[in-house]
Image: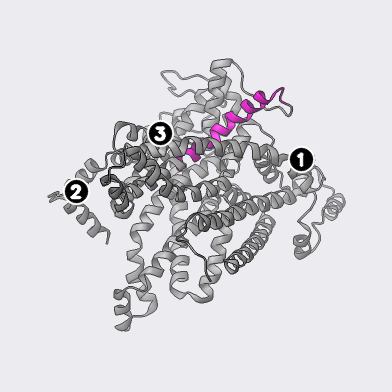
């Protein structure tokens, strides 16, 4: 086990290093650097000034030096350290992501179980169509529809504020966009719970339990669900890391100043140090979550032993 | 292989079908949701192919007097801020959406197949390098990687296709590799090797055809996510550039301010995206049930 964990950990570091190189190279391919954009906006180009700014930003250095310096680099736009720009935005996105994940588990798992237990009934079909539409709707459109609903019902749209008046205000402020993000994940979790439950319900030991006279409730929830939940936990873990896609568009729609929207702003503004650090931040989260899920898998499932 | 599956499916269900049309109708009855998905997809494909005939107006013609006109008999989905007919733009938008979806899925699958086959067949250092590359590409969410790719390549139709295709590669490569690893140990591959067949020929003639079923299942699933990713990229202004009528782009133009003033600009493009992806998802589920009996629900 210790050998396995060490190996996995080293591979994780290798993956992160690879990502940092790939992102760095990709961003150097971008047509037009930040200086061109600044000067386009100003409308005229003084070559001496342009060279001065390129020197200030370190863009005249060799590529290898630029690579070595990017971690902890300074934002081209605000000129603050990248980490100082990113860190204060993390709690906002983390709250949103946490709520979204909470929603998706709260709805996804029970509805998936119901759908499986009532397989091929009208309720099952309804839930399946609902979950499939959740996977088909772009998260930003769902967000826009929610805004539209607010206009129709209250005449205004919920506006993000940095200092909500009370706990309930802030809960409401976060839960509306969180629902828009979480709908997709809950659909995914529901579908997975359903197929995992159906798989288990076909097993021989379930038939044995039924033939011994165990009640439907005991069989479904004691025997089946406990075994069906394992693959679901894996997907919940991976989904948690991959919520980012939904967060990017939802933070944009709802005008929430979190890290996800910041990534889009930084890409648009060619603010390389911010983009690189943000992408690394996202990669670290994904890779760490995958690592933890692997270990949890071993802890939950006694059949899995890592011995190499 | 898939023809066998198809017949096996029919015989298993006790069907006696003679014609191909009969077989299609039979499958449609057995998978009603899949049939609905196929019909939805067919409608969008027809709209894309015959956009010139179906759209009542030119999607790019700017008419100042029609700016933000609400839905009416002449413009039944209204007009955008430039006075362009929304319905015509949605019909033409099917071309963009399907072209990006289909071509990026094909491109991603093609690279994924080559990489996956090479990795699973050659093993050794090729496999090690490929495995690490897959790890790297899969450590970033699809949209994040596509965003960075799109920014690096610059906004254009071709670049958007590439930006979406690259994040799809590792998913295909993984499935093909896993399949290749299983297949290469099977007796029929051993037999082919014993007859002196070259490794490349074995890979192409024996292994590849047998990974077709999981590949089709995966590709149908990816078509939907490719279309959604295009919509998101264009919504964020980093995908399809003006003046192409991309559905995602139409929503970014209208975005949050039109929620209040011109809801038709928000509702219809989003409905088009959702419907076409819903169609691919329904179809994808049915294809999976038919080709991959292990994952069958019932």
Residue at 29% x, 34% y: name it: A121
Residue at which label 3 appears: A130
Tag 3: Cα neighbours inside 10 Å, few (<14), some, or many (≥20)?
A: few
One can see residue A32 in this view? no
Residue at 38% x, 57% y: name it: B215
Say which of A283 and B243 sits in front.
A283
- Please, is residue A4 above or below residue B265 in the view? below
Left or right of A266? Residue B133 is left
Residue at which label 1 appears: A41
Chain for disc number 3 = A
Tags 2 and 1 on a common chain: no
Residue at 68% x, 51% y: name it: A281
Say which of A94 and B132 sits in front.
A94
Left or right of A7? Residue B117 is left
- Observer-side mark, 2 or 1, equals 2
Residue A176 is inside the magenta segment: yes
Left or right of B223? Residue A245 is right
Residue at which label 2 appears: B23
Residue A61 is inside the magenta segment: no
Q: Secondary structure at mark 1?
A: helix
Q: CA distance from mark 1 to mark 3?
A: 47 Å
Choose the circle earlier in sequence order: 1 or 3.
1
Q: Main secondary structure of the magenta part?
A: helix
């Amino acid at each position: 086990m210790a050998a396995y964990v060490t190996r996995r950990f080293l591979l994780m570091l290798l993956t992160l290093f690879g990502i940092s190189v790939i992102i760095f190279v990709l961003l150097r391919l971008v047509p037009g650097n930040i200086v061109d954009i600044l000067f386009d906006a100003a409308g005229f180009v003084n070559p001496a000034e342009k060279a001065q700014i390129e020197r200030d930003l370190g863009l005249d250095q060799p590529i290898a030096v630029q690579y070595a310096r990017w971690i902890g680099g300074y934002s081209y736009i605000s000129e603050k350290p990248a980490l100082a720009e990113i860190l204060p935005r993390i709690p906002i996105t983390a709250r949103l992501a946490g709520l979204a994940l909470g929603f998706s588990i709260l709805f996804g798992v029970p509805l998936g179980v119901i759908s499986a237990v009532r397989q091929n009934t009208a309720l099952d079909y309804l839930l399946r169509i609902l979950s499939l539409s959740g996977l088909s709707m772009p998260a930003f459109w769902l967000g826009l529809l929610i805004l539209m609903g607010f206009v129709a019902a209250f005449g205004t749209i919920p506006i993000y504020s940095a200092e909500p008046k009370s706990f309930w205000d802030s809960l409401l402020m976060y839960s509306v966009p969180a629902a828009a993000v979480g709908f997709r994940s809950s659909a995914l979790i529901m579908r997975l719970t359903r197929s995992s439950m159906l798989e288990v319900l076909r097993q021989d030991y379930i038939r044995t339990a039924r033939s011994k006279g165990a009640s439907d409730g005991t069989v479904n929830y004691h025997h089946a669900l406990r075994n069906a939940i394992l693959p679901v936990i894996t997907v919940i873990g991976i989904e948690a890391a991959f919520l980012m896609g939904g967060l990017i568009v939802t933070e944009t729609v709802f005008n929430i100043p979190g890290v996800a929207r910041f990534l889009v702003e930084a890409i648009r503004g060619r603010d390389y140090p911010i983009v690189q650090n943000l992408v690394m931040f996202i990669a670290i989260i994904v890779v760490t979550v995958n690592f933890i899920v692997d270990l949890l898998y071993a802890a939950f499932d006694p059949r899995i032993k890592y011995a190499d | 292989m898939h023809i066998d599956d198809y017949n096996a499916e029919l015989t298993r269900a006790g069907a006696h079908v003679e014609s191909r049309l009969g077989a299609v109708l039979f499958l449609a009855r057995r998978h009603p949701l899949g049939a609905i998905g196929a019909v939805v997809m067919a409608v969008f494909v027809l709209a894309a192919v015959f956009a010139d005939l179906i759209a009542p107006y030119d999607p790019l013609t700017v008419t100042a007097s029609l700016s933000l006109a609400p839905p009416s008999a002449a413009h039944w989905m209204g007009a955008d801020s430039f006075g362009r007919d929304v319905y015509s733009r949605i019909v033409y938008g099917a071309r963009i959406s399907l072209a990006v979806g289909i071509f990026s899925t094909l491109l991603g699958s093609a690279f994924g197949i080559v990489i996956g086959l090479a990795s699973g067949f050659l093993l050794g250092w090729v496999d090690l390098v490929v495995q690490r590359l897959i790890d790297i590409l899969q450590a970033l969410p699809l949209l994040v990687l596509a965003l960075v790719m799109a920014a690096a390549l610059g906004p254009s139709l071709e670049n958007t296709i590439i930006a979406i295709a690259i994040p799809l590669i590792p998913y295909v490569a993984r499935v093909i590799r896993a399949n290749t690893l299983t297949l290469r140990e099977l007796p029929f591959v051993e037999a082919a090797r014993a007859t002196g067949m070259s490794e490349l020929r074995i890979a192409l003639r024996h292994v590849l055809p047998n990974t077709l079923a999981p590949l089709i299942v995966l590709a149908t699933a990816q078509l939907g996510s490719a279309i959604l990713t295009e919509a998101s990229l264009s919504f964020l202004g980093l995908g399809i550039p003006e003046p192409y009528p991309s559905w995602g782009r139409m929503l970014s133009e209208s975005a949050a301010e039109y929620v209040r003033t011109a809801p038709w600009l928000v509702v219809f493009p989003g409905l088009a995206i959702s419907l076409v992806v819903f169609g691919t998802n329904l179809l994808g589920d049915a294809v999976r049930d038919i080709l991959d009996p292990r994952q069958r629900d019932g």
